[in-house]
């Protein structure tokens, strides 16, 4: 081992308490990424049978990676921020900027190269705990196992390690830009302002966040709503970049507000959070991220479910909806019931649609979907998909299809264009004759039973829309035959209820991510509080009692929690508003109030609890 690595190992051991929390967060990051990797690899290896799992893992991976890399960067930066004075002193004895950067990089490498693989291996092992949930959700076949390979570990290391190194380099950048003696003099003081580049990035993120929240005004349906949900991350990122200036501005005004009843602990806490705005920003951001993630994820799920219910109610005009039919025989039975005036059969045919013209593997260009079959002459009073272009009656022509606005936007096609479909390994080309607006309720593709039969499919009615002159008597007769009968409103409500197993899986994955973010936030609070031992000693020597110090920290932690809650809330509002507008039009935004309140409470409890528990150990009874 070279002298540089020996020095890095010694420094890491000397700061083992600080690096212990960082290692824990890095290990958790590796575990989260490896778990997602196992799900992704399992779905890919399963082929068509694993399409749903691959889609779920891909969707979850985007959010998880953004959050994980965000928290890793904040954790490493905060761990090194407390060593500014040490690094400045090293510079005064002749160390060059390159030597200091190399020293910090080697320390980060030593911690990451141990923590990330260990965490990733634990993530591989813990992924097996998800298998029963995956089986219940129908994403893994009973009796089959999860895919195992070193690839998720390698991916975790390849993603986390560069971010940790970059965060370490940025954390020492400010110290290394100064002359050594100036760096020592300013190491105990945090500059309240931010640089021009950072300010520009903060403004750019804020503008991008607001613009993304408004994307449903331009991009229709679920695609625009998914883009709007990402605005929360951009706005939190803007707050992280502009954090020191925001904190200084906000609490600078608060500390100057007249208040006769404010005691010394409150005044000191206000000045502390204003004077150490960078330290506070590193703590606030993970808490705000936790609140934003959980609220946006669950609120989007609620908005999609509500939009689907609204679209089904608007699309179906029948008196009754019969499900559980056994095909054409039971359809004839429904049509022959006295009192039934109209019976419209609906069925679903699983197919694949080509989404890309590039010469790539099938898995990348063919997407699983379903065709909803409807008669071409179906009365608009029974089924109204909300046609915006073309005519639904044109489906009577063989080889035609109607597509939703979401599918039209995603594929870039419209009326008159062709769509490539594949059924049972045979490809077919159909012509688009209509575009409709209620894809969440009816599906993205509508064809007639005759067109589906032309593919070789044998569509069997699974739902029958019934128009009747005597709903009560028809309902009793159909139920006596063993069929499930509901009104259109009841059918819309029950058909959009989330599957319990799928909902459980989604909740577990979101909870896993929130636990990781909570761990990062708690570690940031512990590092920040434990690193203030010298400050506590100085305050004690000037006459501050232990009780007063704890009071100051209580006020500071409350201010931290409130600021994190405020940033998270402000970041969530444009996102949920954009999602609601995109899916439901201008109405009251859909917010998962229960999750929001629980996470708001968790933010406050974490901020206060982690700070005071660490302070109770950091501030001894007698400070020497």
Image (cartoon, grey):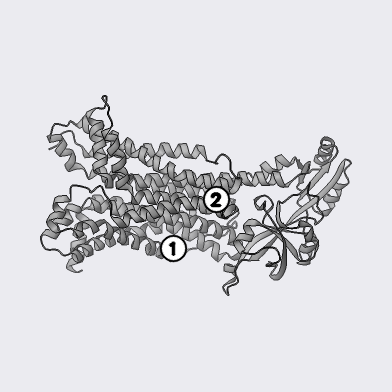
Mark 1 crowd level (few <14, some 14–19, many ≥20, 10 Å Cα): many
Q: Which mark is residue 520?
A: none
Residue in the picture at 83% in, 50% down? 331
Badge 2: how crowded within 10 Å, few (<14), some, or many (20+)?
Answer: some
Q: Is residue 488 in sight in this rendering?
A: yes
Label 2 element class: helix
Q: Give the answer, above or below, for where 185 lies relative to 37.
A: above
* Quarter of the image that includes the C terminus: top left
- Secondary structure at numbered mark 1: helix
For the question of whether residue 129 can be seen, the reply is no
- State the residue lying farthest toward the bottom: 359
Residue underneath mark 2: 133
Residue 96 shown left or right of residue 298 in the figure: left
Q: Earlier in the sequence, mark 2 or mark 1?
A: 2
Q: Which residue is mark 1?
A: 152
Q: Is residue 474 or residue 170 the one in the foreground?
A: 170
Dividing the picture into quarters, in which one does residue 87 lie? bottom left
Q: Position of residue 230 (x, y in %)?
A: 48, 52
């Amino acid at each position: 081992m070279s002298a540089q690595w020996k020095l890095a190992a010694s420094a890491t051991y000397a700061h083992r308490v600080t690096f212990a929390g960082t290692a824990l967060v890095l290990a958790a990051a590796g575990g989260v990424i490896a778990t997602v990797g196992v799900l992704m690899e399992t779905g890919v290896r399963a082929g068509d049978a694993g399409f749903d799992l691959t889609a779920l893992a891909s969707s979850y991976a985007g959010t998880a990676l953004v959050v994980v890399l965000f928290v890793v960067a904040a954790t490493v930066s905060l761990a090194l921020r407390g060593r500014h004075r040490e690094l400045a002193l090293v510079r005064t004895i002749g160390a060059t900027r390159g030597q200091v950067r190399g020293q910090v990089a080697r320390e980060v490498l030593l911690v990451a190269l141990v923590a990330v693989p260990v965490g990733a291996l634990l993530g591989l092992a813990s992924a097996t705990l998800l298998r029963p949930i995956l089986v219940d959700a129908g994403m893994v076949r009973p009796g089959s196992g999860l895919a195992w390979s070193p690839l998720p570990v390698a991916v975790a290391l390849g993603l986390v390690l560069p971010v940790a190194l970059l965060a370490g380099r940025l954390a020492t950048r400010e110290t290394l830009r100064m002359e050594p003696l100036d760096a020592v003099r300013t190491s105990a003081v945090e500059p309240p302002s931010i640089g021009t580049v950072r300010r520009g990035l903060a403004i750019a993120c804020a503008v991008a966040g607001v613009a993304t929240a408004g994307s449903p005004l331009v991009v229709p349906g679920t695609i625009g709503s998914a883009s709007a949900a990402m605005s929360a991350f951009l706005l939190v990122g803007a707050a992280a970049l502009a954090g020191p200036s925001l904190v200084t501005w906000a609490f600078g005004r608060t500390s100057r507000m007249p208040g006769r009843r404010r005691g010394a602990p409150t005044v000191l806490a206000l000045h502390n959070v204003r004077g150490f705005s960078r330290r506070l920003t590193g703590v606030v951001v993970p808490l705000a991220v936790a609140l934003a993630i959980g609220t946006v994820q669950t609120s989007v799920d609620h908005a999609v479910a509500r939009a689907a219910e609204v679209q089904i109610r608007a699309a179906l005009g029948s008196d009754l909806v019969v499900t559980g039919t056994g095909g054409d025989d039971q359809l004839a039975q429904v049509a022959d019931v006295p009192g039934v005036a109209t019976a419209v059969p609906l069925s679903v045919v699983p197919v694949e649609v080509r989404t890309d013209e590039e010469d790539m593997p099938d898995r990348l260009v063919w997407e699983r979907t379903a065709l909803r079959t409807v008669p071409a002459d179906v009365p608009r009073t029974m089924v109204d998909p909300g046609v915006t272009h073309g005519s639904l009656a044109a489906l009577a022509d063989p080889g035609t299809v109607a597509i939703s606005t979401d599918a039209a936007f995603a594929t870039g096609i419209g009326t008159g264009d062709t769509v490539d479909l594949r059924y049972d390994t045979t490809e077919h080309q159909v012509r688009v004759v209509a575009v409709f607006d209620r894809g969440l309720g009816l599906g993205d593709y509508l064809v007639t039973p005759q067109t589906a039969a032309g593919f070789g499919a044998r569509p069997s009615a699974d739902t029958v829309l019934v128009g009747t002159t005597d709903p009560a008597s028809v309902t009793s007769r159909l139920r006596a035959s063993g069929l499930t009968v509901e009104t259109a409103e009841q059918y819309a409500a029950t058909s959009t209820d989330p599957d319990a197993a799928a909902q459980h899986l989604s909740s577990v994955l979101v909870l896993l991510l929130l636990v990781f973010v909570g761990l990062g936030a708690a570690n940031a609070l512990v590092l920040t509080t434990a690193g203030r031992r010298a400050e506590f000693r100085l305050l004690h020597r000037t006459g501050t009692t232990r009780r007063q110090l704890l009071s100051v920290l209580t006020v500071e932690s409350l201010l931290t929690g409130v600021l994190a809650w405020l940033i998270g809330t402000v970041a969530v509002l444009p996102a949920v508003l954009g999602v609601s507008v995109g899916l439901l039009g201008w109405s009251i935004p859909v917010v998962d109030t229960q999750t929001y309140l629980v996470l708001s409470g968790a933010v406050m409890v974490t901020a206060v609890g982690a700070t005071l528990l660490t302070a109770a150990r950091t501030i001894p009874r007698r400070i020497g």
